[in-house]
Amino acid sequence: MVDLNINGEIRSYDVPDDMPLLWVLRDVAGLVGTKFGCGIAQCGACTVHVDGRPARSCVMSVSAVGNRQIRTIEAIGRDPVGQGVQKAWVDLDVVQCGYCQSGQIMSAVALLNVKREPSDADIDAAMAGNVCRCGTYPRIRAAIKTASKV
Amino acid sequence: MSGPAYIHIPNRISRRSLLGAGLVIGFAAAASRKAHAAGEQPGLGKIQDVTGKGQTGTAFEGFAPGGFVRISPDGRITLIVPNVEMGQGIYTGEAMLIAEELEAGLDQVQVETAPPNEQLYRQPLLKSQTTGGSTSIRGAYGPLRQAGAAARTMIIGAAAQRWRVPATECTASRGVVTHVRTNRTLSYGELALEAGRQPVPQNVPLKDPSQWKLIGTPARRTDSPGKTDGTATFGIDIRVPGMKVAAVAASPVIGGKLVSVDDSAARAIPGVRDVIRIANAVAVTADHYWAARQGLAALRITWDDGPNAGMSSAQLIDDLKGAYGKVKAIVARHDGDVDGAMARAAQRVEAEYELPFLAHATMEPINTTIHVRPDGCDVWVGTQVPTVAQQLVAQATGLPLDKVAVHNQLLGGGFGRRLEADSIQQAAELAKHVSYPVKIIWSREEDIQHDMFRPAYYDRMSAALGSDGLPLAWVDHITGGSITAHYMPQGLPPGEIDPDAVEGAKETPYDFPAVHVDWTRADPPIPFTWWRGVGPTHNVFVVESFVDELAHAAKRDPIDYRKALLGKNPRSRAVLEMAAEKAGWGAPLPPRSGRGVSLHDSFGSHLAIVLQVAVADNGEIKLQRAVAVMDCGLTINPDQVKAQMEGGLNFGLTAALYSDITFRNGRVQQSNFNDYRMLRIHESPAIEVHVIRSTEDPGGVGETATVSAAPALGNALFAATGVRLRRYPFDRGRLASQAMASNARQGTTALASEDR
């Protein structure tokens, strides 16, 4: 049994210690907003926050998470920065297929939490780990800037 | 392309099953139905092959669930769009077409994707219920507006009857009918049941474009909110009670077979349920995907590698090139005196181009959730071909077609991969061995290595230039496989051209005095299919690179040279001129920087893109800025045209810079995003898009900018470095500066002398 604090709720999960957080979220906790893209931390689709910092849940075992706070896309709208990012994403119609966008938004919120007005170089550094196959990068960049001004 | 409206009045049983649906309007193109029945070649779907006989014969009789408009008495307005959403914004664009004539706001409607039903949702251009080939808006533009207009007419008719007034005294707006003289109102929901009993209107006049409220406005995507808060459901997100999750491995050598499996270690892993063997694959089901993955990794599998055991890229390319001149070419086009022009040319230019195998690598890995029962089957999947999926599952399970329910979901990218239902067929073959619902997920490695690839091509170009440097003759010899042939029940008849193989080459934007285009068929021994941009993505790279070569051979500016060939093509000339102007064409740039242009007329649209790059001394490429000017005729949702220009260009740039599927010992050598990499945000250029305002018929959009990417980049690299690269992904080693190259040589020499 592993105790996890997911979106503010602490629950016990009957899963092996080495199970990646991604699959606990998706297949055990039923939080499918966090996506599987590559399984090797190359695409960022599985990005969640662990104690506020972005983490690739596909390669992070639940034992490595420990009792730290996990935040997923389902709960990112609870804080103002998350809300602002989601609003900018909708206002600019960033999404296309949308599959990578949970991860993009989690990375963007994590960036804005530490840097209120990120430069292009900040955005490059924070977002380069998130692949968008549809190529929505120009709008991701624009939406982060829009959200930073709110 | 547009057909009459049909109304489907629910019978009693169906009405119960529809939970209070009132008005249900369906629509189909009678002409295309006849064409299908007569055996006309289908487009991007295997429909003729698999639809089944009875379906075309009994079209439109009895109740058909769905149609395009469903209004329930509680006021819910549901628009059922015939195409699937894979990022291109079609849920929004097609909803706009219906809502415009229905007189409802986008904020008042829910959008659903159509269930598999060839009678109702056969796409007029592709002649099947298929989403692909940038055809959706072109196919739907007339029929969906007519569907909305028919529904509005029936709703108004119902109101007029209730009020006992002439229908002409009533108007409709935002889901409400008003009797203007008395100012009485009724909502669509209040009229739904009566509207369903109204006569079918024939030839309802459509609104004049000056009256449009939605079409042409930058409407927000209907799917944005769900895709930003984690609630959007893709196929991979489906969860069904009692469901297990499976990991699967197909023969690592394409075409190989499963011989035996030792599953003792796998079965010992907690959570593992079953090990399923089929002819060429094995799957492990488990309580969750992690256990399934662990179980799969613990299997000891023996494969029979089969006929492709020794296959290599070198062999495939040799075979491709060897087919040229050996296999008889089929002429796609021969106009004017090509031989005479070649004989009297002031200058002749020749070049050979190559294109690699490509994987689709949709962000959502391939997956299918399926529950096979003795009396029926449910399939949850995101597919571009729902009726093909239904048919293949019926075949695999032995169930009648009407017992197979396909629940189509949002697609986490399609790009042509989900035009193929091989994975859905595999899922059915696996799932019939277990009683529970199972979600089968391909790992990213499985997804890339068992893709159906965009095939390699080998093209030989030649041109005769006159004394003014302009072409007297243009010759394009294409060598490559036939994708279309796989979609024809009897294959491609001998001597017939595959239109996809020559699309973008047979017709170019340019006016050449003499033209010869032919195609040598050379199918690789592995599964291959369409990839975003289909024929034009292959051919326009060659055509636009070679036109650029001719301009330089003629010592002419590439934009001016193209303009000289566009006398009969004002729309292409206009986008080219505007792109050049907006990009600052001709303005000085630093050394090893350059601008390249690509122009093409594909999918009924005209697109010019100018791309500016800088090349480092070591050959690394920096994409700086792109300017796209699009004339796609009338735009339904201009902001989504822009979005497709931005995304489509980046998609194509990934291929031009990085994508190359290679084979060794019959196995794909790439496996994941580490070695089949994607363009990332810091590599994406700034992209500026201009969309021409036009009243011409809508053209296709979703694939056009992908088509432009490689030629624009190749031409920009030539402008920056003077090196012409005729194969992509572009070889950075050949772009290193002279100084760098000579340093490298000296370094090698120094090392070599030290070694001595």
Image (spheres, coloured by chain):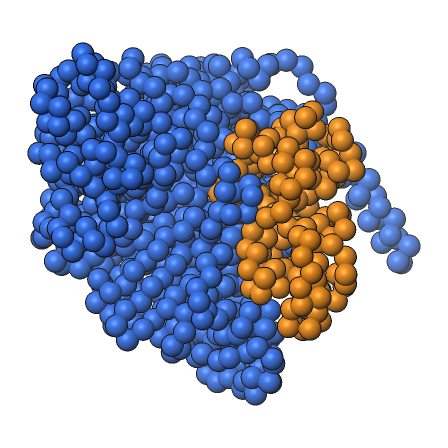
Residue sitting at x 28%, y 31%: B98
The answer to whether any part of residue B555 appears in the image is yes
Q: Would you say A51 lies left or right of B158 here? A: right
Could you say which quadrant of the image residue B438 lies in?
bottom left
Query: Which residue is painted at 18% across and 30% down in the image?
Result: B155
- Furthest toward the right, the residue is B754
Image height check: is B321 above or below B405? above
Q: In this view, does B397 lie to the left or right of B542?
A: left
- In this view of the protein, which residue sits in the foreground, B374 or B189? B189
Question: Could you tell me residue B89's position as x and y percent?
Answer: 42, 36
Instruction: Say which quadrant the N terminus of chain B sits in.
Output: top left
Hue of chain A? orange
Query: Residue at left 10%, top 19%?
Result: B165
The count of marks equals 0
The vertical placement of B587 against B480, above or below, is: above
Q: Which residue is drawn at 46% across and 52% down?
A: B234
* Residue in the foreground of this view, choosing between B679 and B318: B679
Q: Position of residue B434 (x, y in %)?
A: 40, 77
Asked whether, in this view, residue A52 is left or right of residue B537, the answer is: right
Chain depicted in blue: B
Q: Is residue B671 above or below residue A88?
A: below
Residue A43 position within the rendered picture, expressed as x and y whole percent measured from the top left: 63, 50
Q: Position of residue B225 (x, y in %)?
A: 51, 38
Is B161 in front, or is B141? B161
Quadrant of residue B473 within the rendered picture = top left
> In the figure, is residue A117 to the left or right of A9?
right
The quadrant the C terminus of chain B occupies is bottom right
B635 vs B117, nearest the viewer: B117
* Residue B724 visible: no
Please tell me in which quadrant of the rendered image residue B54 appears: bottom left
